[in-house]
Image (cartoon, rainbow, N blue to C red):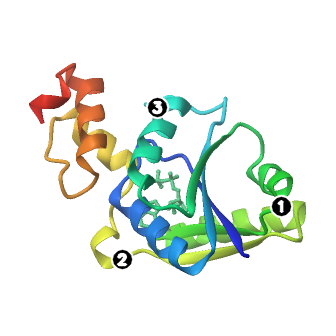
Amino acid sequence: MIRAAFPGSFDPPTFGHIDIIERSRSIFDELVVVIAENKQKHYLFSAEERRVMMIEMVKDWKNVSVMVCDTLIVELLKRQNIKIMVRGVRNVMDFSYESELSMMNKALSPDIETIFMMTRPEYLVLRSSSVRELAAFNGDLSALTPPLVAAELRKKFMNLPAAAQ
Ligand code: ADP
């Protein structure tokens, strides 16, 4: 029984994240999506809002669960006895950042392995910050994030009802 975790801000979740979740859940027996809540960081969506959106997106996948973490991610993994952390990689910049992070995590928790998963070409330039920016300008989000997330973004920026999507 191999359990893995996929941590991130998911502010908001995108198709890039969903793709990594879908591919990871077919490799591992169980996948825990960990919503990071860092008090030093400013998010558009609260941890609870991000959790609710993520739960809705993974609701049909029985081996995927969602948790919020406001401590070090490796501490949560240790508590949950999870030894694999999945990270998505889009480009060399991601790789450079992620490899440093994984080495720091390795020093903190030698038992935990970080596994990098390459993005799909169609999600190469997809990141939550671009989605937030596009939403602020009322751009078309349909290729970037599911309708549920697009509706929540629209509510944040335009104060429009979800039905206006
Ligand atoms: P973002 O970088 O979009 O703000 P997060 O910080 O929430 O996203 O990222 C959580 C994890 O998902 C990280 O490992 C990140 O590299 C990965 N990720 C984000 N967007 C993509 C994407 N388009 N394709 C693959 N992995 C991604």
Q: Quadrant of residue 111?
A: bottom right
> Which of 67/95 is in front?
67
Residue at point 27%, 73% (across, down): 122
**Amino acid under disc 3:** Glu
Residue identified by numbered label 2: 120
Q: Is 123 located above or below residue 75 in the figure?
A: below
**Residue 1, percent across and down?**
73, 76
> Which of 72/152 is in front?
152
Q: Secondary structure at mark 1?
A: loop
**Amino acid under disc 1:** Asn
Q: How many marks?
A: 3
Residue at point 10%, 30% (across, down): 164
Q: CA distance from mark 1 to mark 2?
A: 30 Å
**Is the residue at mark 2 in contact range of ligand 1, meaning its CB lies under 8 Å from it?**
yes
Residue identified by numbered label 3: 49
Residue at point 66%, 31% (across, down): 40
Few, some or many C-alpha atoms within 10 Å of disc 1 (few <14, some 14-19, many ≥20)? few
